[in-house]
Amino acid sequence: MISIRQARIDDMLKIQHCNQQCLPEHYKGSYYKYVLLGWPTLSFVAEDDNGKIIGYVMVKIDEEGGDDKKGFITSLSVARPYRKLGIGETLLRLTSQALVDNYGATSVILQVRISNKNAINLYCNKLNFEKKSIIKEYYTDGEDAHLLSKDLAKLERFDNPLK
């Protein structure tokens, strides 16, 4: 059974391990600490029966957003054996709800590799994110990114089905 809950600071190393197993973009431990302590209600983890973190979403408030509160999804990952089970979708819906409930956010943004078709399908076709622009050579390997955005003004209430 998979459960999803709010991330805690003591999850930091497990989240980092999941990130390193799943994504080419890796962050230093200090970054996880910065996000988890700075915005403790916005990040979530998915874990198996043994407490192993098999997915996560890391989120902060975009500090350059001006008067409008804008969420920024900095990282989302689900371990390969657990993909296509709705875990990523649930993580994103929970964090969107938390952005509205806790910060009054009006939108959320993220960047995704141009080549990551599965993620783009999730974001754009299932969760109604819109492609805003292409950021040239965004990633360290030179790949471009799509900048995606979602309006949270008319967000339908979402409660965690995997508690």
Image (tube, rainbow, N blue to C red):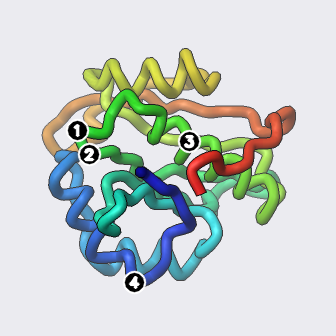
Q: Position of residue 123 (x, y in %)?
A: 51, 27
Element type at mark 1: helix
Element type at mark 3: helix
The answer to whether the residues at label 2 and label 1 have Cβ atoms under 8 Å apart is yes
Seen at 50% across and 41% down, the residue is: 110
| Label 3, label 4: how far apart the Cα atoms are | 22 Å
The answer to whether the residues at label 1 and label 3 have Cβ atoms under 8 Å apart is no
| Label 1, label 3: how far apart the Cα atoms are | 16 Å
Local packing at callout 3 (Cα closer than 10 Å; few below 14, some 14-19, many 20+) is some
In this image, 5 relative to 15: left or right?
A: right
The answer to whether the residues at label 4 and label 1 have Cβ atoms under 8 Å apart is no
In this image, 41 relative to 27: left or right?
A: right
Mark 4 or mark 1, which has the lower sequence index? 4
The residue at which mark 2 appears reads as: 79
Q: Amino acid at mark 1?
A: Arg
| Label 4, label 1: how far apart the Cα atoms are | 23 Å
Mark 3 or mark 2, which has the lower sequence index? 2
Mark 3 or mark 4, which has the lower sequence index? 4
| Residue 80 image label | 1
Q: Position of residue 47 (x, y in %)?
A: 38, 59
| Residue 10 image label | 4
| Residue 90 image label | 3
Local packing at callout 4 (Cα closer than 10 Å; few below 14, some 14-19, many 20+) is few
Mark 4 or mark 2, which has the lower sequence index? 4
Q: Position of residue 51 (x, y in %)?
A: 34, 68
Residue toward you, 94 or 47: 47
Seen at 74% across and 33% down, the residue is: 151
